[in-house]
Image (cartoon, rainbow, N blue to C red):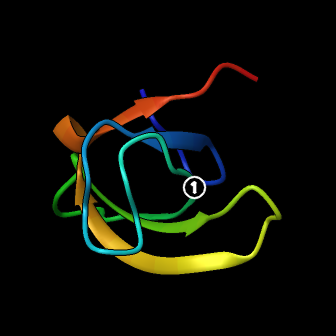
Amino acid sequence: MIKEYDIVKAVKDLNDKVKEGSEGTVLMVYPDFPSVYEIEFFDEMKESLDVLTVQVDDLIKVNS
């Protein structure tokens, strides 16, 4: 189960900035849509790439 503040990874290209393998932090789990998340994705330097609303099927949770 993915929760707020978990680190996740995109399993496919989500747009021109957020590519497959990009990591992000879960900012919000939508209470009415528990398989939809607001994610801030970042690059290797921890600079923000984009904030996207993403379906659970487009993510994997990164073990911490």
Q: Residue furthest top?
A: 63
Residue at position x 50%, y 29% from top? Answer: 61
Residue 34: image x %, image y %? 24, 49
Using the image as rendered, state which of residue 44 and residue 48 is in the foreground: 44
Residue in the image at 30% along x and 74% along y: 16
Secondary structure at numbered mark 1: strand
Residue 26 on image: x %, y %: 54, 57
For this orientation, the residue located farthest to the front is: 16
Where does label 1 land, which residue? 24
- Against 64, residue 8 (above or below) is below
* Residue furthest right as drawn: 45
Q: Is residue 26 left or right of residue 35?
A: right
- Where residue 57 sits in the image (x, y, percent)? 18, 36
Q: Quadrant of the C terminus?
A: top right
Residue 1 sits in which quadrant?
A: top left
In this picture, is 35 found above or below 1? below
Numbered label tally? 1
For residue 53, side relative to residue 33 (left or right): right
